Image: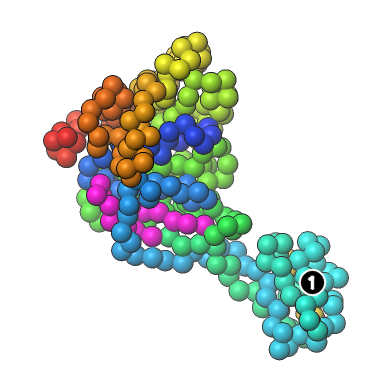
Amino acid sequence: MREIIIISGKGGTGKTSLTGAFAHLAGGQIICDLDVDAPDLHLLLKPSRERQEEFYSGHEAKIDPGKCDGCGVCASLCQFGAIREKGSGYAVDLLRCEGCKVCVAFCPAEAIGFPEKHCGQWYISATRFGPLVHAQLFPGAENSGRLVMVLKQQARELAKAQGADLVLCDGAPGIGCPVISSLSGAHLAVAVTEPTPSGRHDLERVAELCGHFQIPLAVIINKYDLNPEETSRIAGFCRGRSYPVAGRLPHDLSVTEAMVQGLVVTELPETAFSLGLKRAWSRIRELAGLGCQGQAAASL
Ligand code: SF4
Ligand code: SF4
């Protein structure tokens, strides 16, 4: 079983549109949306939920108003200003609580509990391209890296149970904690970039990250024809570091058209873009050690 993760140094490079199209081209794989802070692969794949689980991570303080006598010790000790007066007692502002447990330890009335923090939900859903493992972190919730690890674990178990040879992951943009978690154990990272100075700069940052974790990296230059100068700079950077450029995709309105229809671009009649995408996918499979394209994609 191979694990491919599609990443980008920043949002808006077309990463998710490409992941959706690769899911269509691959056939018979497990799809995993690791962008848990702002997932959007479901908008293209229209999943139907088959399993839903709650995600808890860390702890938070919770005052029992029935036991609290309003002494104020907790508010004076909390270094994060998370405890405030409320009515005749006190209450915890959960957005400020850092879970240090000091208030719990020093409350003379033992009125403060320390339950696990409910941070989000994760799901396994059916889609027209295969099972999708995905999640939604609640606004302001932390530990997205840990949720990413939960999703990857579930996707791997599902792949094993179903005999799938590929887990295809849509990673979070940037180089933060969820991306670092996403890269763990991946056989190939594919960075989608665009020909702008910031696109090049962000590609350099993700390349450094992949290098640090020794994850092989391939690159796709999206909208390459919008800025040939920057495209050749990016290609030069890749050549210098021996990163294969798996594809150069032209700017094509069919991508937006597909999105508006809730489809992936390879489901529309063939264009130069979708043809380039198919070639890129063959190259990615090869680089990931997957060999020849499977039956499902061959029939497209
Ligand atoms: S320390 Fe305990 S009893 Fe005192 S205000 Fe805080 S929760 Fe209430
Ligand atoms: S657990 Fe720590 S941060 Fe949270 S309310 Fe108590 S003292 Fe403040």
Amino acid type, residue under disc 1 in the picture: Arg
Q: Position of residue 269 (x, y in %)?
A: 22, 31
**Magenta part mainly helix, strand or loop?**
strand
Q: Residue at x 80, y 64 (%)?
A: 81
Which residue does the numbered mark 1 point to in the structure image?
A: 84
Callout 1: few (<14), some (14-19), or many (20+) C-alpha neighbours within 10 Å?
A: some
Residue 166 located left or right of residue 122: left
In terms of depth relative to the viewer, which is nearer, 299 or 80?
A: 299
Q: Which residues are magenta?
A: 123-137
Q: Left or right: where does residue 54 sit relative to residue 20?
A: right
Q: Toward the viewer: 263 or 129? A: 263
**Res 187 visible:** no
In the rendering, at what x and y percent does residue 197 appear?
Answer: 57, 20
Whether residue 179 can be seen here: yes
Residue at the farthest bottom position: 66
Above or below, comparing residue 194 to residue 22 in the picture: above
- Magenta includes 133? yes
Q: Secondary structure at mark 1?
A: strand
Q: Which residue lies at the image location 28% right of the left edge and 56% below the top edge? A: 126
Q: Nearer the viewer, residue 214 or 247?
A: 247
Q: Which quadrant holds residue 293?
A: top left
Is 266 rendered above or below residue 73?
Answer: above
Residue 71 occupies which quadrant of the picture?
bottom right
- Residue 71 vs 159, above or below: the answer is below
Q: Decide whether residue 143 is among the magenta residues.
A: no
- Against 296, residue 84 (above or below) is below
Q: Quadrant of residue 190?
A: top left
Q: Quadrant of the C terminus?
A: top left
- Residue 145 placed where, x, y %? 53, 50
Quarter containing the N terminus = top left
